[in-house]
Each structure stands twice: as structure tokens, then as C-alpha cells.
Image (tube, helix red, strand yellow):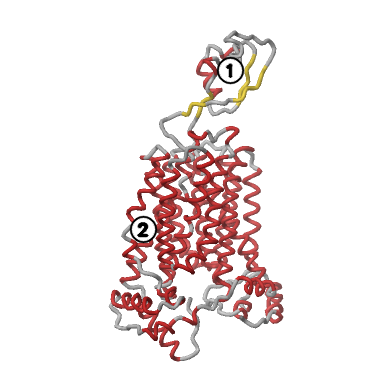
Amino acid sequence: MEVEKCDTDNKSRTKVYDEINVFGKYQSRLCLMLLLSTIPNSFTTFQFLAIHYTPQFRCNVINGTYYGPANDYNNSNSVNSRLMNTCNFDNITGLTLVNETNAYNNTEQHHEDMSTNMVCTDWTFMGNETSAVTEFGMICNNKWQKPFSVSMYMFGKLVGGVMGGLISDKFGRKPTFLVFSAWQYLTTFVTSFSPNMSSYSAMMFLTGCGGLVNYVAAVLLGTEVVAPKKRSMVYVYISVGYSIGCMLIAPLAFFILNWRWFLRTIGFVGLLYIPYIWLLDESPLWLLAVGKNDEAKKVLNKIAKCNKVQSSVSKDESSEMLVETDDSIGLWPTCKLIARTPTLLKRLAIVGLSWFTCSGSYYTISLDIGSLSGNRFLNILLLGVAEFVATGLFFVAWKRWGNRNSYLIFMSASAVVFAIRPLLKMSSIAALQVAVVIVGRLFITTSFCVIFVYTGELFPTAVRNICMGFSSGMSRFGSMLAPFIIYAGHQTNSIAVPLCIAVFVLLTSSLYIFLPKTEKTQLPQTVQEALEMKSGGLSCHLKKQKTKTSKENFPDP
């Protein structure tokens, strides 16, 4: 991150670095490679839309005996309809009950004036599509296994996110990106051979461990070789790649109806990225940070040559060029600094809660797309289109309303979507239900883009990375909770769950009125600069903010 230089020599070296790292041919090629590399990330994140598909099923009657009202005995169509998508049923007077274990030696038992509730233990799934749900029986009493396996994947992303930053800082951006990309493809491929639910859930956890690390490493590889003013372009390229991946899930799921081969196909995709071993360069910023000045010089001069920039970097210049840009402090000093600065503590609490809410809402509405009426493949495709459009909508909203107000607007709108969705289920217009959910996904995705940028604008350089890490961790907790929110909504089949989500989203987003507007302001480099950013709330709150700022005049680390 760019830090203002005080002396002329440092300004000169920074100017040379910026001249080399203009968004030229080298950066364009790199961003295109990163765009292509992030496409499979959405495959693994939203693989559950394909491999957790639950087709219609029929409870298998025992030894051909029908269960249901006596007057339905000779009406096979009526009986079949009663046994469709059901987990239990009533055995009523007038029907023959044959014991499943043949304990009655196939003798018929007639019961008068008696109704026995029977639990279905065997099903026949309709259609020729196989999924993890059909093979492992994740329905009825085992329905909880479906959200559990998704949460295991999300928990893996949490663990990987924590460890990935440390690994990336120690071993470099390029090795981290390559190793965890290979990890993602390999674990996805191995998951396709899972023999049972236990191994399947364990592999989901391991797959999740690599799903976020390579994505973050890709962001670092891009942003660290681009001048600060052009870094937003890196996010655009990577977001576009992720959106393309979301759209490609639909045709993949349409043509590959076997869940095991769906996962194997994703694994085979990894072979296309083997050339990245030779095409990618290590981040020059990381090389400088660990003292590998000769290698940094080679990379920087390669960039200059590719961009046809006359500036070149000597060994001495490379060793001093960016040493002073790393103003971050350790975890414990960061905790102490934030704890004794109430304004920063308040911001971190609000932002962390917003990441939790946004992530939970994002995955709740995305992973439940299979419950909508209509063609499920088309619905998945529209989900990807919404992801793509959200990237453009973010830039329009950011320029018009700023980050803070954009988040308030879009999350409030998404709360309305959650509130009206159960009402729309009563409507016979399937297209309207789908349209509202897709629009809700559009709003939440745009909100995610906003907080990703806005969070970094609220905190000083020394604590910015750790605050971003904390916020990302909070989002993982939200994503882990999302599958169980969906499960609770389906089990209760009431409007209480979506209404509670709507109220929670509205309340947490409203807290953003206590955060400052950041448009047309520089990133705060010091704690004092961060404290001087005024809240955009009510006028009385502004006065309180001024008083707090004067009291919280702490020295910067």
C-alpha cells in the first residue's frame, strides 16, 4: 500500500515504481491470467447447487403392499401421489400390512379401526440424475446431513483463510497460489470417490481449506504489481472471472448429471493451469519484504521491459524502494490499539457484523436457489448473471452514492426481498418468485463488493490488514450458518425464518449511519487521520464525534 514519503529520494523511488507498474501490457496479461484462474473457485463454492440436487422421490412400499386410505386401495395413482416426497405415512384400516423383516411368515394381518404411522426407510428417486443426496440418502431423518456437509466446507474456508495469510507471507504469493490451487482441484477430484457420508464431509472440509487461500493469493499477486490508482482494475478482473464461473455451473450441471463425474470434471480443469508455473512471477513487493532484492530487481525490470518503460531498477534502489511501505504492526499491538480507541472499536464491531450478515444472506439466498419453481438450470444461470451485473452496479453506485450509502441502500433492499419472499410462494407466478430472488442476490452481491472496499477505508495502515482478516473471519461464520438457516426454513415451512432474517439484515445495515463517508478522502495512514473521519449520521452525533476525536488523540505506533 502506498505511504506518503517524506524525503525526496523516497519520492523518486516511489515514482520509478509507479512508472514501472502502470497498468500496461504486463499487468493486462497478469489480470487476464488471474481472471481465468478464479473461474473454478466459483465451481467449488457453488458445487452444491449441482451435487446436492434433491429430485422427487417415492417411498418404496413393502413387498408391493400399498398404504393409505382404504378407498385408495384400487387407485394406484392416488396411492403413488400420497407416497411421493414423503417421509412417513399412515397405514389405515382395510389395507394389508406385511412385515418388512418377514416376521409374520408373509401372513396377512388385518387391523380394524386402527391407524399406524409408518416411517419410510427406502425410496426410489425419479429421473436419471444422481447426486450426493440420492447416494447417501440425505433426506427425511438424514436431511440434516445436507447442511452439515456444506458447513464443513465453509469451516474449511475459515481455517484456510486464517492459515493462508501466514503461509502467503512466509513462502510467497506465487507458491501459495499454485499449491492451494492444486490442493483445490485434487481434493475436489478425490471427493468424487467418497464411499460414505463421513468421508464425504471430511473431504468437503479439506476442499474448503484451499478454496479461499488461492483466491486471496491471486488478489495479492495482482494488486502488488499495479500502481495504487489502478488496483481497482485487479478486483474487476477477478470478480468477472468469479462471475463467469457462476454462469458456467449451469451448463456443467446440465450436461454432467452424475455428481461424481461433475466433481471429477472440476478436478481435470486444474490441468489447464499447469503452465502458470512458468507464466507467473513472484510479487516484487514480497521479494523486497523478505530481502530477495536480486530477484525483485529481475521481476521489476521484466515488468518495465514488457510495458516498454525506460525506467530501470538497480539493486540498491530495489532494496530501498518499498521497505517503508510496510507499516503494519503485530496482532497483539493491534488489539491493544483498537481496545483503547473506542471509535475504531465501534467501527470494527459494526463492520464485522456487516460481513457476518452479508455473507450469511449471500449464501442463504444462493444455495437455496434449487427450491425455486421453474427450470433449475436456468435459475442457476441467472444467479451467475446477477453476480456479473453486480460488479458493474457496484461501480455505478459507488460513484453516485459512495460506499457507505450504497451498502445502506442495497442491504435494506435485500431485507425487503427476504420479507416478501414467503408471500410470493403463495403466488402461482413462478417467474415472479425467481425474479425477486435473483434481484435479491444482485443487491447482496453488490453489498459484498462495497464492504470489501469500504472496510479498508475505515482503518489506519497499521491495523488495516488485521481488521480485514477479522472481518473475513466473521463472514466465514455467516456462511457456516447459512445452510442451517435454509434447513430451518424448509423444516418449519413458516414465514418466521425469512422475516427474522429480514429484520436482522435491516437492523445491522442501519448501523452504518454511524460510520463515516469515505468518498473523496485519502486512505487514513495514521490513527489520528482515521479518527478525524466524521460520521455521516445525525447532527447531534457529529458533535459527539468531534468530542471523541479530541479525546482519542493517541500516538500512532
Mark 2: give few (<14), some (14-19) or many (20+) Cα within 10 Å: some
Label 2 secondary element: helix
Q: Is residue 162 left or right of residue 291?
A: right
Task: Note whether 95 is above or below 181 in the view shown.
Answer: above
Q: Nearer the viewer, mark 1 or mark 2?
A: 1
| Gap in angstroms between the C-alphas marked 1 and 2 | 56 Å
On the image, the x and y values in percent for residue 389 come to 43, 56
Q: Is residue 279 left or right of residue 190?
A: left
Residue matched to label 1: 101
Q: Is residue 361 visible?
A: no
Report if the CB atoms under discs 1 and 2 are less than 8 Å apart: no
Residue matched to label 2: 36
Task: Note whether 369 is above or below 230 in the view shown.
Answer: above
Residue lying farthest to the bottom in this orientation: 8
Task: Note whether 538 is above or below 494 in the view shown.
Answer: below
Between discs 1 and 2, the one toward the N terminus: 2
Mark 1: give few (<14), some (14-19) or many (20+) Cα within 10 Å: few
Question: Front-most of 18 and 370?
Answer: 18
Please name the residue shown 65% across and 12% down the image.
93
Task: Note whether 419 is above or below 451 in the view shown.
Answer: above
Image quadrant containing the C terminus: bottom right
On the image, the x and y values in percent for residue 439 come to 50, 51
Number of marks in picture: 2
Label 1 secondary element: loop
Q: Is residue 236 visible?
A: yes
Question: Front-most of 263 and 436?
Answer: 263
On the image, the x and y values in percent for residue 256 come to 37, 40
Q: Amino acid at mark 1?
A: Thr
Q: Amino acid at mark 2?
A: Leu
Please name the residue shown 35% across and 70% down the image.
27
**Label ID, residue 462:** none
Please name the residue shown 34% across and 57% down the image.
273
